[in-house]
Amino acid sequence: MPSMNFDKKYCTSQINGTVYMTTMKNLSEEQLTKLNAGAGEIYLSNIPKKCSAKRIMQVAVKLGEVYMLRHKIDFLRDSRGFAYLQYINETHVKNTLHALQQLFWNAKLGIRVRKSRNQRRLLLNNVDRLSPVQVYHELSKYSQYIKLCVHEVQPYYYIYVIEYRNNDKAAIAHHMLRSKMGHFGANAYIEWLDKYQENNTSQTLPSCCLQLQQPVTEQQLPAIHEKSEHVCFII
């Protein structure tokens, strides 16, 4: 069984409403790239209100070395009922789920375990004052995303799909952008792409194939409209 000396093995920190417990072990660049993209991520739900991140880890490490636990808490530091967990060996997640569930039951915590969907795409809609290029520059002020897909759903009416490195980065951006919607228009809103797709099953967003060259300028947009009836491009 792994050592329970968390102070020597894991670094604990907090950003807004998330408590992080992250391994201090040196990992290869390849391992970090996979893990930071959400590989092997496990979703924990039904966490008791007074259950701490450390208590969750005391159970989780019985199955192996943990890369990171992200535990969501409220302003009183009580659990919001869910967390995300990743093991350093992300390839055995399928075998881990059942065993981890059993461990939480044995510990009488009632925590439920399933594979995370690793949601990392947000949708920005109802932008009514800015062009796609202006939206691109405005978004860049508030968050670091890896891809911005622009879909024209009606003539010169766009929706924006913003993709982040992982669910954690997307959640932080979602929290930040909700407070900045006034910069995108009076009726603009941000939501998770999965939620939008669940509520708009008749509308399928095509895959973007046109990559705009940097630096992005307003002069590139008329040329895009000339090439295609349905405008969709990546910034």
Image (cartoon, rainbow, N blue to C red):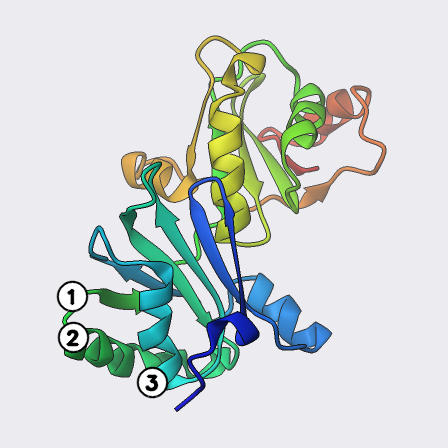
| Secondary structure category for the residue under label 2 | helix
Q: Is residue 104 visible?
A: yes
As rendered, which of 79 and 198 lies closer to the eye? 79
Q: In this figure, which residue is indicated by the disc labeled 3?
A: 95
Report the amino acid beneath label 2: Trp
Cα distance in 3D space between marks 3 and 1: 19 Å
Residue at label 1?
110
Task: Relative to 50, say whether 206 is above or below.
Answer: above
The quarter of the rendered structure image containing the N terminus is: bottom left
Q: Which one is in front in this view, the residue at disc 3 or the one at disc 2?
A: 2
Point out residue 11 in the picture as x, y percentages from the top left corner.
55, 64
Q: Position of residue 218 (x, y in %)?
A: 78, 19
In the rendered view, would you say 59 is above or below 118? below
Q: Closer to the camera: disc 3 or disc 1?
A: 1
Q: Amino acid at mark 1?
A: Gly
- Quadrant location of the C terminus? top right
Residue annotated with mark 2: 105
The reply to whether residue 115 is visible in this rendering is: no
Residue at point 39% right, 60% down? Answer: 84
Position in image of residue 3 (x %, y %): 45, 85
Q: Earlier in the sequence, mark 3 or mark 1?
A: 3
- Towards the viewer: 14 or 179: 14
Of residues 83 and 152, which is closer to you in this image?
83
The amino acid marked with disc number 3 is Asn
User: Which corner quadrant of the image does residue 46 belong to?
Assistant: bottom left
Q: CA distance from mark 1 to mark 2?
A: 6 Å
